[in-house]
Image (cartoon, grey):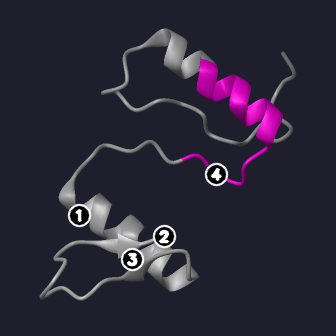
Amino acid sequence: MNAPSDPDLNIQAPAYVKNARLIAWVADMAALCKPARIHWCYGSQEEYERLCQELVDAGTFKRLNPAKRPGSYLA
């Protein structure tokens, strides 16, 4: 497989990621896709809210009426 185009791109998995095949797959995808950065999700509520807000800010998500559909988005 090709090496990542940016040797400084940090594909280092956090301590909670133990699956070697997953880490290798991420490295392979980084080599193919050449992302600007890699974000390893850890699943907290704060992370979820931040990522949803980033998508709202980018126009990808539209927040639905919280009275009718709390925590829901249109994508």
The secondary structure type at the circle numbered 1 is: helix
Asked if the stretch drawn in magenta spans residue 27, the answer is yes
Q: Mark 1 highlights which residue? A: 46
Residue 40 versus residue 14 in the image, above or below: below
Q: Earlier in the sequence, mark 1 or mark 4?
A: 4
The secondary structure type at the circle numbered 2 is: loop
Q: Earlier in the sequence, mark 2 or mark 1?
A: 1
Say what amino acid the circle numbered 4 marks.
Arg
User: 60 and 19: which one is in front?
Assistant: 60
Residue 75: give its label.
2
Residue 37: give its label.
4
Q: Main secondary structure of the magenta part?
A: helix
How far is the residue under mark 2 from the one under mark 4? 23 Å
How far is the residue under mark 1 from the one under mark 4? 20 Å
Range of the magenta residues? 25-38
Say what amino acid the circle numbered 1 marks.
Glu
In the image, what residue occupies the spot 18% across and 85% down?
Answer: 66
**The image quarter in which residue 34 lies:** top right
In the image, what residue occupies the spot 87% across and 22% down?
Answer: 2
Say what amino acid the circle numbered 3 marks.
Gln
